[in-house]
């Protein structure tokens, strides 16, 4: 029998988990690019620059050592899931990874999204969520007490991808105003296109949309751009835009979003960016792609210094480090 008075395990009075910065992101959900004005964008981009310098100099730090992320992916991912996990590791935090095998979680027993979120939030400080339904992150955010970061909701939005895309354009070309940006591929289902287009519409840019008829940009988004006075043009040929584009943003035809696979077969080999196509482009143009690619950009293009898509991948790490730290009040 224990008779002595128990000593407390922890001296809790000496420790308070407080935000270090009042940044406007603390404890906020990140659901849509509509939450980001130019000031917020500049803030995150400056923090991402700091994260990049830190990662190059030190590799890791302990900024988020007291925090845990739940990374919950109901749809496949390589870049978004691993970059969030890497971001947390480089900042000294912990991760609950429900990424490669959601089938091994209780979702396979029929657990609802909300119950999964309400459970996971007991174990973590922030949740990154990818799901196939538009609005799923917003629904999760309604119930969760911890911040939800939308890592892609069906054909809806992919806000963290758009932030890293914009950061890449600024890092590569030094500015955003005045640029001619051509978006190529699946503009109907491509959530990265939807989010980046919304962010770009805050700037003085010209937008060119290149796609087959059936995969045009959604009408509501196009109308928003026109209402904002953005110069837009639609075409179905890359050759119409390649000579003048400063940014060629290429996307995959999203097979998984088609209900009729015959329609996918009709458009799947719609275009390919090859060295011959690149020969027509400006010397200072950049080619971007959110990846994965499935034949839209020939591998030979990778050797072209204008191919920015793997630098874009790296920028995803710094942007996600900045976002996690900002949401947790540590940047
Ligand atoms: N760009 C992107 O979202 O890639 P993943 O699907 O691999 O996460």
Image (tube, grey):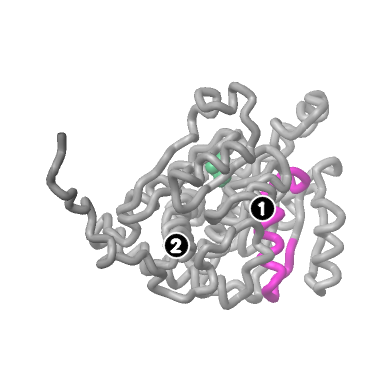
Q: Is residue 132 magenta?
A: no
The residue under the point 48% across, 69% down is 45
Q: For residue 226, which quarter of the picture?
A: bottom right
Q: Quadrant of the N terminus?
A: top left
Asked if residue 51 lies left or right of residue 191, the reply is left
Q: Quadrant of the C terminus?
A: bottom left
Query: For the residue with label 2, is its CB less than 8 Å from the closest atom of ligand 1?
Result: no
Q: Position of residue 175 (x, y in %)?
A: 55, 74
Position of 296 with respect to 221 (left or right) is left
> Whole-Å distance between the Cαs marked 2 and 1?
18 Å
Q: Which image quadrant shows ligand 1? A: top right
Q: Is residue 298 visible?
A: no
Relative to 192, is 76 on the left or the right?
left
- In the rendered image, the residue lying farthest to the left is 4
Neighbourhood count class around disc 1 (C-alpha, 10 Å): few under 14, some 14–19, many 20 upward: few
Viewer-proximal residue, 64 or 36? Answer: 64
Q: Which residues are magenta?
A: 185-207
Judging by the rendered image, the residue that carries numbered circle 2 is: 328
Which image quarter: residue 60?
A: bottom left
Q: Position of residue 93 (x, y in %)?
A: 34, 51
**Circle 2 Cα neighbour tier, 10 Å, few/some/many (<14 / 14–19 / ≥20):** many
Relative to 105, is 65 on the left or the right? left
Percent from the top left, x then y, of residue 256? 70, 31
* Between 303 and 90, the one nearer to me in the picture: 90
Give the structural element (helix, strand or loop) at label 2.
loop
Q: Residue at label 1? A: 142
In this view of the protein, which residue sits in the foreground, 180 or 311?
Answer: 311
Does any portion of residue 164 appear in the rendered image?
Answer: yes
């Amino acid at each position: 029998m224990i008779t002595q008075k128990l000593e407390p395990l922890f001296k809790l009075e000496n420790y308070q988990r407080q935000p270090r910065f009042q940044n406007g992101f603390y404890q906020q959900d990140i659901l849509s690019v509509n939450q980001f004005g130019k000031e917020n964008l500049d803030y995150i981009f400056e923090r991402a620059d700091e994260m990049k310098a830190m990662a190059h100099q030190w590799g890791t730090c302990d900024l988020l050592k007291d925090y845990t992320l739940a990374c919950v992916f109901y749809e496949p991912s390589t870049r978004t899931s691993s970059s969030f996990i890497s971001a947390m590791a480089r900042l000294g935090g912990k991760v609950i990874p429900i990424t490669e095998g959601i089938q091994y979680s209780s979702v396979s027993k029929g657990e609802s999204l909300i119950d999964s979120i309400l459970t996971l939030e007991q174990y973590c400080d922030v949740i990154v969520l990818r799901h196939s339904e538009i609005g799923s992150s917003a629904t999760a955010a309604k119930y969760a007490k911890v911040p939800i970061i939308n890592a892609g909701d069906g054909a809806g939005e992919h806000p963290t991808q758009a932030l890293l895309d914009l950061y890449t354009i600024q890092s590569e070309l030094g500015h955003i105003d005045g640029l001619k940006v051509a978006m190529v591929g699946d503009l109907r289902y491509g959530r990265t296109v939807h989010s980046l287009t919304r962010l770009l519409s805050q700037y003085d840019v010209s937008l060119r949309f290149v796609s087959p008829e059936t995969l045009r940009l959604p009408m509501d988004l196009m109308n928003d751009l026109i209402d904002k006075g953005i110069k837009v043009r639609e075409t179905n040929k890359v050759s119409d835009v390649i000579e003048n584009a400063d940014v060629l943003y290429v996307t995959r035809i999203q097979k998984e979003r088609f209900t009729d696979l015959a329609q996918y077969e009709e458009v799947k080999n719609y275009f390919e960016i090859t060295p011959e196509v690149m020969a027509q482009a400006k010397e200072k143009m950049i080619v971007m792609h959110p990846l994965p690619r499935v034949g839209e950009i020939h591998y030979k293009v990778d050797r072209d210094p204008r191919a920015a898509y793997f630098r874009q991948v790296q920028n995803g790490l710094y942007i996600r480090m900045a976002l996690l730290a900002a949401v947790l009040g540590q940047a």
